[in-house]
Image: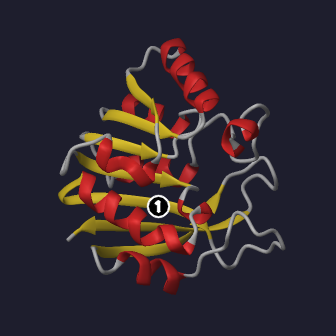
Amino acid sequence: MFWDEVYKGTPPWDIDHPQPAFQALIESGEIRPGRALDIGCGRGENAIMLAKNGCDVTGIDLAKDAISDAKAKAIERHVKVNFIVGNVLEMDQLFTEDEFDIVIDSGLFHVITDEERLLFTRHVHKVLKEGGKYFMLCFSDKEPGEYELPRRASKAEIESTFSPLFNIIYIKDVIFDSLLNPGRRQAYLLSATKS
């Protein structure tokens, strides 16, 4: 599988610390303790940060190696996180409706195809409690690049994808930290609540 191959090495997004945009959400109080789901969690840095800040966290990723590494990292850091291998497009088989207060997405939305976006949005909506918060970090259309993936999303695309099922609080310019051009990749951070 593609994602398992990627995690045999160190992918550019595997920065060995949480994304600064998510750290800022905790520092500002926008993310508070509660049941949290990190979708596309990779090797678990963001999930571990949430757990250290009082959240009851589940992390899900397709890549078995990434999940194995995340589990080992959580044990090493004395943090309890439920890491599972799974497909976010099949979350209805893994989680109950209204299970989570918070869902975070660091770099998953921008690798999902147009055809998968509606299903993806429905799944995120379903697992969130009423009024639950969804925070999504993706490359913005301001980020230069000729590569097909990760795709660059516009504010209009993000709005049209999520506004049918979510109240959009903001979409703001942030940095997506990466091993390629650290601290300089243009991104959007979406804050939305389940409507």
Task: Report the amino acid beneath label 1.
Answer: Met
Residue name at image x 41 percent, y 47 percent: 27
| Residue 176 position by quadrant | bottom right
User: On screen, 189 above or below 182?
Assistant: below
Q: How many marks?
A: 1
Residue name at image x 30 percent, y 80 percent: 164
Q: Is residue 97 left or right of residue 139?
A: left
Q: Which is nearer the eye, 146 or 54? A: 146
Image location (x, y in percent) of residue 129:
18, 54
Image location (x, y in percent) of residue 90:
39, 50
Scheme of image coloration: secondary structure
Image location (x, y in percent) of residue 39:
45, 47
User: On screen, 31 above or below 15?
Assistant: below
Q: Is residue 68 left or right of residue 195?
A: right
User: On screen, 41 above or below 154?
Assistant: above
Q: Which residue is mark 1?
A: 136
Can the viewer see residue 25?
Answer: no
Q: Residues within 10 Å of mark 1 (few under 14, many from 20)?
A: many
Q: Which is nearer the eye, 118 or 31? A: 118
Residue name at image x 56 percent, y 63 percent: 112
User: On screen, 121 above or below 161?
Assistant: above
Image location (x, y in percent) of residue 122:
32, 65
Q: Residue furthest left?
A: 130
Residue name at image x 46 percent, y 61 percent: 136
Q: Quadrant of the N terminus?
A: top right
Can the viewer see residue 194?
Answer: yes
Q: Quadrant of the C terminus?
A: bottom left
Q: Is residue 162 left or right of residue 175?
A: left
Element class at badge 1:
strand
